[in-house]
Amino acid sequence: MPPAHPFDDDKLREECGIFGVSGVKDASSFVALGLHALQHRGQEAGGIVTHDPTQGFNSARRFGYVRDNFTSTDIMETLPGPLAIGHVRYSTAGSKGQTAIRDVQPFFGEFSMGGAAIAHNGNITNADALRRELIERGSIFQSSSDSECIIHLMARSLQRNIPERMEDALRRVEGAFSIVAMTRTKLIGVRDPLGVRPLVLGKIGDGWVLSSETCALDIIGSEFIREIEPGEMVVITPEHGVQSHFPFRKQKPRFCIFEHVYFSRPDSILGGRSVYETRESIGRELAKENPVDADLVCPVPDSGTPAAIGYSLESGIPYAMGIIRNQYMGRTFIEPTEQIRNMGVRLKLNVNRALIRGKRVILVDDSVVRGTTSRKIKEMILDAGAKEVHFRIASPPTAWPCFYGVDTPQREKLLAATMSEEEMRSHLGVDSLKFITLDGLYRAVGEAGGRNPATPQYCDACFSGEYPVKPSDMLAKGFEMKEAAE
Ligand code: SF4
């Protein structure tokens, strides 16, 4: 399935959202709503697994949006029970863009002590090596997804119960993982020792909820309790409530800083602070670091909006909606003709001509990946009669691929990997182009002293090239780390 919009390949894309509920009637309906609120984390496919004491495990996995599948009575009636987990995906490691339904999570495994289903957000950086080893030892894989390794490692563990088998399995796994899983009676949540991807805990009536983001707790009226800590496993049962374990060697957390910039929804809470507020602070930092004389500050909608507001507040330059987004660009053009594809960005964004004409415009965007969309937007703004165009970017130059559950083009396709800032400015054809610095970004997310270069507080590998977990499969395929590449 192609991307939902013809130019969406010019953004990094979060690859998964996960959600789980226990202790409520018709848990699958809550999971469907939660996944709907997490749809920005993956639009290609979704799946739900449930358990009912009389009807056992049931599952449904479908391509397309949650709203187009998991609202139908025909499907939802097949998913009874008080315990359910679900997953939305773009495409994780595996068959990118040509997913088979067998790659759609949650995955299910039948063990001697009963079944278990698992949904994973992140990426296992040693999955190729693990898969080879498991196949040599007799495992038969059903999918091309790296996450299936966890089920096979659990099957080989000698531990007596499923949470302990999962601990065993996850100790062999490298990379980033936030997981929701379930047995017949337990809802389980785990975050990798660095806590790269998010996972939060909520309460609903007598039941419990696990979710990638707090915005999905809000939609079902669930109370946000806390974030699952890096390296923590929670096992939730009706009898004992939430039991917490720390099965991994303790490490200094390295949460994905890009969740603050772009991936998470602005109405979610991360690190005790609203993502919207953080993005506004990013805009303020950007304005302090990179002022310019202009008439208007306009966001590239929607993701650039809070940073543009911050830039405007800090600089005193009026904020305006110079670009209007068509909210209804949905599945209509999912398989566009060549002619429509060439219209590119105009399908989704239109310039507010009356506002732009004769103005010096600051455009605020969250990131520059390939630069193709930025170029088209600049053309649209100039066509509309703008006098000057200044790009201000709410993240540092994206010069390195992400191997922790975010879809990134190959390094050579990243504009910042091959060009200096001045070369990028000239390539985009704008009057000025400036990015927030890494230190500025750290300050904006709440690290007053900026980035600690000896022990960075976040994962920022896509900007710095410093990978907190060695991407061993990619190194085996010839990827060159920073020291080797430079
Ligand atoms: S490499 Fe970038 S996108 Fe990936 S986890 Fe790290 S900060 Fe996030």
Image: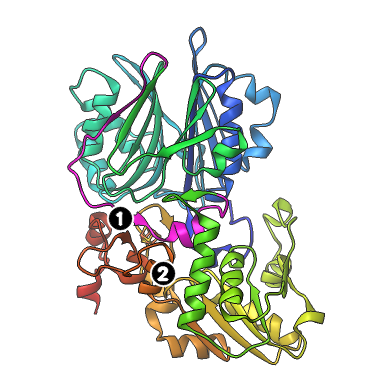
Residue at position x 21%, y 49% from top?
251
**Which secondary structure, mark 2?**
helix
Way the structure is coloured: rainbow
Q: Where residue 93 sits: x, y (%)?
A: 39, 50
Which residue position is annotated with label 2? 441
Find the residue positioned furthest to the right.
354
In the rendered structure, does residue 264 fall within the stretch colored magenta? yes
Question: For this view, does 170 lie left or right of residue 435?
Answer: left
In the rendered structure, does residue 139 fall within the stretch colored magenta? no
Q: Where residue 184 sits: x, y (%)?
A: 41, 16
What kind of residue is marked 2?
Leu
| Mark closer to the chain start, 1 or 2 | 1
Name the front one of labels 1 and 2.
2
Residue at position x 44%, y 76% from top?
436
What kind of residue is marked 1?
Arg
Q: Which residues are magenta?
A: 238-267
Determine crowd level at label 2: few under 14, some 14-19, many 20+ residues with C-alpha closer than 10 A. many
Tell which quarter ligand 1 is in.
bottom left
Q: Which mark is residue 315?
A: none
Queried on whether the Cβ of the residue with tag 2 lies below 8 angstroms from ligand 1, the answer reads no
Q: Is residue 367 visible in the rendered structure shown here?
A: no
Determine crowd level at label 1: few under 14, some 14-19, many 20+ residues with C-alpha closer than 10 A. many
**Which secondary structure, mark 1?**
loop
Question: For this view, does 435 lie left or right of residue 471?
Answer: right
Q: Where residue 40 sits: x, y (%)?
A: 57, 50
Queried on whether the Cβ of the residue with tag 1 lies below 8 angstroms from ligand 1, the answer reads yes
Q: Where residue 295 sits: x, y (%)?
A: 68, 86
Residue 152 found in image quarter = top left
Residue at position x 57%, y 70% from top?
310
Q: Which mark is residue 254?
A: 1
Q: Of 111 and 389, which appears nearest the observer?
A: 389
